[in-house]
């Protein structure tokens, strides 16, 4: 077996708030939406630069408050872009971690956490 991709499914409660957070603020693009019939919960796929996330209003698909840990590059630039957007409900910091990365955590309106991490160059006794 070879795993080709991992896609987290995050629980959401409000479609418009999810779009405001994931599309308008974080810059994801919607690649598909599914609803069985009008008035039923929605299931959405959003994608941004190699990261695919499924967002579901269905109660059995995921647990609110899920945390997703992500390795990435270009984190400082992504952080600056988010801060410049002045999103009313989230102004994430950028921190150095004990495990050798820069980390920025954002919390969506439903309590889910996305932990974006970029490895930083460590200097230990003159060794890279």
Image: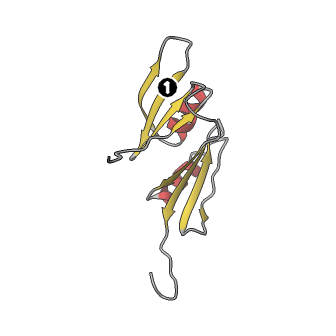
Q: Where residue 61 sits in the image (x, y, percent)?
A: 55, 30
Considering the image in quadrants, where does the C terminus appear?
bottom left
Q: Where residue 1 sits in the image (x, y, percent)?
A: 32, 46
Report which quarter residue 45 is drawn in: top left
Residue at 50 percent across and 81 percent down: it is: 123
Q: Given the current orientation, which residue lies at the most extreme left position?
A: 1
Q: Given the current orientation, which residue lies at the most extreme bottom position?
A: 125
Q: Say few, some or many: other residues with alpha carbon within 10 Å of mark 1 (under 14 / 14 to 19 / 20 or more).
A: many
Q: SS of the residue at dot 1?
A: strand
Residue at 63 percent across and 52 percent down: it is: 92
Label 1 belongs to which residue?
Answer: 43
Q: Is residue 42 shown above or below 89?
A: above
Q: Given the current orientation, which residue lies at the most extreme top position?
A: 38
Q: Where residue 115 sits in the image (x, y, percent)?
A: 56, 52
**Closer to us: 39 or 84:** 39
* Left or right, 67 with reference to 4: right
State the scheme by which the image is colored: secondary structure
Residue at 45 percent across and 58 percent down: it is: 74
Q: Given the current orientation, which residue lies at the most extreme front position?
A: 1
Q: Is residue 103 shown above or below 121?
A: above
**Closer to us: 75 or 37:** 37
* Left or right, 5 with reference to 57: left
Q: Where residue 127 sits in the image (x, y, percent)?
A: 46, 85
Q: How many marks?
A: 1
């Amino acid at each position: 077996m070879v795993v080709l991709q991992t896609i987290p499914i995050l629980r959401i409660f409000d479609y418009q708030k999810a779009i405001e957070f994931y599309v308008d603020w974080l810059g994801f693009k919607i690649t598909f939406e599914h609803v069985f019939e009008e008035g039923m919960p929605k299931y959405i796929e959003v994608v941004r630069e190699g990261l695919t996330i499924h967002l579901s209003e269905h109660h059995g698909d995921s647990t609110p408050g899920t945390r997703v840990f992500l390795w990435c590059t270009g984190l400082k630039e992504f952080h600056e872009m988010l801060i410049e957007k002045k999103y009313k409900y989230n102004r994430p910091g950028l921190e150095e971690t004990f495990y050798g990365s820069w980390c920025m955590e954002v919390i969506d309106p439903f309590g889910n956490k996305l932990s974006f991490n970029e490895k930083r160059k460590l200097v230990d006794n003159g060794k890279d």
